[in-house]
Amino acid sequence: MTDHEDAALFARLRSLWSDVDPMPASLIDRMIAAVAAEDLSSEYALLTLVEQPLGAVRAESDALTLQFSDGTTSILLHVTATATGRHRIDGWVDTEAAELVLVQGERERTTRSNASGRFVFDDVPAGLSRVRLTTHDGRALSTPQFELA
């Protein structure tokens, strides 16, 4: 068969399938949404503020409690301002964590949780922050950014 004959045959096949089993009108939009949502749990975590309205930690008496979850693993953070004007982050995870990393721009600080899932980041400066968790089995959870002011 020549290229022209192949093209004609494929055109007839397309026409046949379009008549017999037409593509649903919403298929393209549904496929784009399905592909976009496929890896959402590892790309984004659900942010839930607990006890406090949305805001940054601003004064010594202020405290902020944040909960992040990807549906499998959860991280709870309790942020308090210290007398030095910096912050202390007390955290708990509900899985055995291999490593927890506090990321602030180019700065990274690493810690591990204890047997009960507790961890601490002390003397944390103000700025946009994110906590990245890696479990012993290789799963990763990265929180959305939150601001310490």
Image: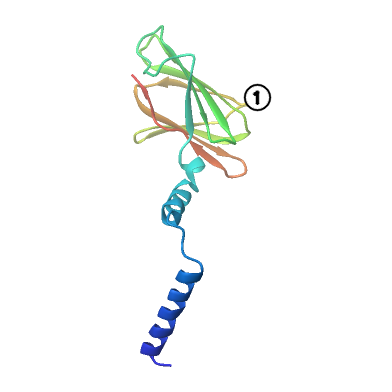
Point out the residue furthest to the front here: 19
Considering only vertical position in the picture, is 134 above or below 55?
below
Point out the residue furthest to the bottom here: 1
Point out the residue furthest to the top here: 61
**Residue 28 falls in image quadrant:** bottom left
Q: Secondary structure at mark 1?
A: loop
Q: How many marks?
A: 1
Looking at the image, which residue is at 48% across and 35% down?
45
Classify the position of the N terminus by image quarter: bottom left
| Residue 110 image point, x, y percent | 48, 32
User: Which coloring applies here?
Assistant: rainbow
| Residue 21 image point, x, y percent | 51, 67
| In front of the other: 113 or 30 | 30
| In front of the other: 67 or 137 | 67
| Residue 42 image point, x, y percent | 50, 42
Tell me the kind of residue under disc 1: Ser
Considering only vertical position in the picture, is 63 above or below 71?
above
Looking at the image, which residue is at 40% across and 89% down?
5
Classify the position of the C terminus by image quarter: top left
Looking at the image, which residue is at 49% across and 14% down?
51
Q: What residue is shown with label 1?
A: 116
**Residue 136 falls in image quadrant:** top right
Looking at the image, which residue is at 41% across and 11% down?
82
User: Within 10 Å of the Cα at label 1, are there few (<14), some (14-19), or many (20+) other Cα atoms?
Assistant: few
| In front of the other: 39 or 88 | 39
| Residue 74 image point, x, y percent | 56, 30
